[in-house]
Amino acid sequence: DIQMTQSPSSLSASVGDRVAITCQASQDISNSLNWYQQKPGKAPKLLIYDAYYLATGVPSRFSGSGSGTDFTFTISSLQPEDIATYYCQQHDNVPGTFGPGTNVDIK
Amino acid sequence: EVQLVESGGGLVQPGGSLRLSCAASGFTFSDYAMTWVRQAPGKGLEWVSSISESGGDTYYADSVKGRFTISRDNSKNTLYLQMNSLRVEDTAVYFCAKVIYNWNPISPHYWGPGTLVTVSS
């Protein structure tokens, strides 16, 4: 199975800050990576698919990059409504493993 | 608008069974593979199972293989997850999801709100 790691596990930043989360796959997954946002008590929401495509209706302050084994998710200007846990997920091979998540908070 | 609503969760004893349902609307259900993902209390997301648009191909996580069965009824726009031999570690919120591409069964796009399954004596 492909293992996914994320860092950091949590971060605290100020409104307006640029925030970056990294995700690493245990083997080459090309660009088969999604990013999800999950707020407490809610279902996850797809933000980025295939490493860098923005899902419909998602604000442009969210972006993704990378390919192969190393990926980055960026919030260009953190907003209060971005407080959530963010997960990466590889969809190159079954099982579609998720990263452990990154909790993002406002300082 | 895509809508997915799970039902069938509840409290069950270890070794028991439960069948989850997911009613879909707002898209052509028979055109898309579907998937189940779960989240144990306070934990991360775990992909559980997926099924192709026709139901002919199914996929399972090792943790549920042989105990869970995914199925669908395209005439009723409904996805199912039959869960047998339930264990305490199966306790989680179970989400159903429509996939992004109909050719990739493990890439969730739209998610339902989830249904809680609690396995406890």
Image (cartoon, rainbow, N blue to C red):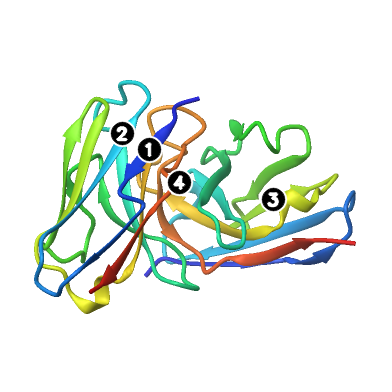
Query: Can you give x and y, in whole percent of width and height, for residue B94 in the image?
Result: 61, 58
Question: Does the residue at mark 1 contact the one at mark 3 (Cβ under 8 Å)?
Answer: no
Question: Could you classify mark 3 by the number of other residues whose Cα lies within 10 Å: few (under 14), some (14-19), or many (20 or more)?
Answer: many
Q: Which residue is mark 3?
A: B81
The tag on residue A5 is 1
- Chain where mark 4 sits: B
First in sequence: mark 4 or mark 3? 4
Q: CA distance from mark 4 to mark 3?
A: 17 Å
Question: Does the residue at mark 1 contact the one at mark 2 (Cβ under 8 Å)?
Answer: yes
Query: Can you give x and y, in whole percent of width and height, for residue A24 in the image?
Result: 31, 33
Query: Can you give x and y, in whole percent of width and height, for residue A96 in the image?
Result: 47, 36
Image: A82 above or below A46: below
Report the side of A33 relative to A64 (left or right).
right
Q: Is residue A90 visible?
A: no
Q: Quadrant of residue A51?
A: top left
Task: Describe the element under mark 4 as helix, strand or loop.
Answer: loop
Identified by mark 1, the residue type is: Thr
Q: CA distance from mark 1 to mark 3?
A: 29 Å
For the C terminus of chain A, the quadrant is bottom left
Q: Which residue is mark 4?
A: B32
Q: CA distance from mark 4 to mark 2?
A: 29 Å
Q: Which residue is mark 2?
A: A24
| Residue drawn where x is 31% and y is 26% of the image | A29
The tag on residue A103 is none
Identified by mark 4, the residue type is: Tyr
Residue furthest bottom as drawn: A80
Question: Does the residue at mark 1 contact the one at mark 4 (Cβ under 8 Å)?
Answer: no
First in sequence: mark 1 or mark 2? 1
Query: Can you give x and y, in whole percent of width and height, for residue B112 in the image?
Result: 51, 65
